[in-house]
């Protein structure tokens, strides 16, 4: 669902046109480097993940599935969404929201794939990281919506 959501974010955000300043290009280069590096670290440290359920259906016995295919699909879309938000003309609040979204989605794999778990069956390494994950996720959604509303309320300009 998040992967599909990023596809729609990219489609909607790219309508504003581009403002490719050197600072914005540098930020996008940093995002791409972070996305590739972080994805590679996760795939290296935790190449397979035990799946105990899919939705509400229990998988018994649990199956080990590779993490890399999901990262190869999701990370480019996450970084692509943030990059489009940064490179476009329009609300800086919206662009900040996209960057906070990257921070939020960086906490989840840290807690699920990188940090050691107290017990083998635990879904997360620590519940303490759930709060920053939720806070940054909802802050990101708020900033993106706030920026989009500000853009919609602004008078149209002709170029």
Image (spheres, rainbow, N blue to C red):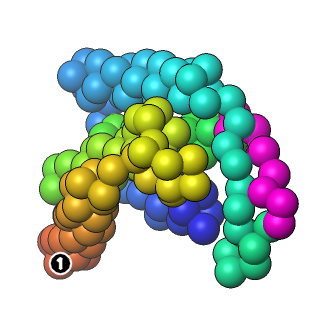
Up the image or down, 31 lies above or below 102; here it is above
Report which quarter residue 21 is drawn in.
Answer: top left
Residue 92 placement (x, y as % from top left): 17, 50
Read off the residue under disc 1: 153
Q: Secondary structure at mark 1?
A: helix
Task: Say above or below: 146 vs 112.
Answer: below
Asked whether 120 or 89 is in front, the reply is 120
Residue, x 57% and y 47% (percent of image)? 120
Mark 1: few/some/many CA within 10 Å (<14, 14-19, 20+)? few
Asked if the stretch drawn in magenta spans residue 6, the answer is no
Residue closest to the far front: 119
Q: Residue at x 21, y 22 (%)?
A: 23
Q: Is residue 134 visible?
A: yes
Image quarter hosting the N terminus: bottom right
The residue segment tinted magenta is 60-68
Give the residue drawn at x 23%, y 61%: 131
């Amino acid at each position: 669902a998040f992967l599909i959501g990023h596809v729609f974010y990219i489609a909607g955000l790219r309508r504003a046109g581009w403002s490719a300043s050197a600072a914005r290009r540098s930020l996008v280069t940093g995002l791409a480097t972070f996305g590739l590096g972080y994805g590679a670290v996760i795939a290296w440290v935790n190449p397979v993940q035990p799946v105990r359920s899919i939705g509400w259906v229990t998988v018994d016995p649990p199956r080990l599935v590779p993490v890399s295919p999901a990262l190869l699909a999701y990370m480019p879309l996450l970084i692509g969404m943030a990059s489009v938000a940064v490179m476009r003309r329009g609300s800086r609040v919206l662009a900040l929201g996209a960057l906070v979204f990257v921070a939020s989605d960086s906490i989840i794999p840290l807690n699920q794939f990188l940090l050691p778990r107290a017990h083998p069956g635990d879904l997360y390494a620590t519940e303490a990281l759930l709060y920053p994950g939720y806070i940054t996720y909802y802050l990101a959604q708020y900033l993106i919506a706030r920026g989009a509303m500000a853009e919609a309320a602004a008078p149209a300009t002709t170029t």
